[in-house]
Image: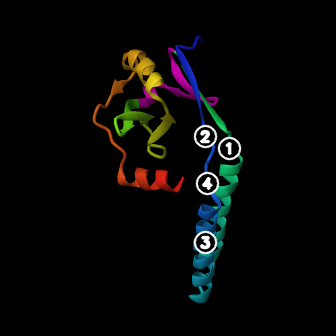
Amino acid sequence: MSNLYSFEFSSEKSRGPLWYIIAFSVIIWFVVWWIFTKQYWLVVISLLLPGVYFLVENNSSDKVIVNFTQLWIDISDTFYEYTKIDWFAFLYVRNKPVVLRLFLKTKLLNYIDLKVDSEQTIDLKQFIPNYLQEREKEEFSFWDKIITFFK
């Protein structure tokens, strides 16, 4: 299958020591609180969830490769058929495109965010509407802004 368009972006996290200090302080505070209130099952959850999160983050790829073909979108060897995607939208920060958001028809994973720049946005806008419907007025939600802040 020939590629219509390909690009890649870095998925490295740029967290400083302060981020880790705050995260571990919050985790320790929850552990101490749950021990103090004798809710030991929450101690296990408070240690297990961040542990799994850090394990997944540290073992994820540093680069994401995106290939658009005539039948599907290949995102780092995971294929999404166009029929499984409802629509797409470009999200802007200060009138500059930063994210291509693909809205999926699944319940568990609602959307996928792909980092883009202005040049990629121009290229993508030329052929994606042939395969998917575009949602023009999409913006970052409050939770998206919070998540982006803590990255």
Gap in angstroms between the C-alphas marked 4 and 3: 17 Å
Q: Is residue 78 magenta?
A: yes
Q: Nearer the viewer, mark 2 or mark 1?
A: 2
Residue span colored magenta: 70-85
Q: Which residue is mark 2?
A: 11
Gap in angstroms between the C-alphas marked 4 and 1: 15 Å
Q: Residue at x 48, y 38 (%)?
A: 113
Label 4 neighbour load within 10 Å: few <14, some 14-19, many 20+ = few
Label 3 neighbour load within 10 Å: few <14, some 14-19, many 20+ = some
Q: Which residue is mark 3?
A: 27
Which amino acid lies under the numbered mark 4 shown in the image of this protein? Arg
Gap in angstroms between the C-alphas marked 2 and 1: 9 Å
Label 1 neighbour load within 10 Å: few <14, some 14-19, many 20+ = few
Residue 99 location in percent, x, y? 45, 36
Which amino acid lies under the numbered mark 3 shown in the image of this protein? Ile
Q: Nearer the viewer, mark 4 or mark 2?
A: 4
Locate the N terminus and report the quarter of the image it occupies: top right
Q: Which residue is mark 4?
A: 15
Which amino acid lies under the numbered mark 2 shown in the image of this protein? Ser
Q: Report the side of 137 relative to 22 (left or right).
A: left
Gap in angstroms between the C-alphas marked 1 and 3: 22 Å
Residue 86 location in percent, x, y? 38, 31
- Mark 4 secondary-structure assignment: loop
Q: How is the image coloured?
A: rainbow
Q: Evaluate if marks 4 and 2 touch, with contact meaning CB atoms under 8 Å apart.
A: no
Q: Evaluate if marks 4 and 1 touch, with contact meaning CB atoms under 8 Å apart.
A: no
Residue 60, labelled with which disc?
A: 1
Q: Is residue 52 above or below residue 8?
A: below
Q: Residue furthest top?
A: 2
Of label 2 and label 1, which has the lower sequence position? Answer: 2
Residue 140 location in percent, x, y? 37, 45
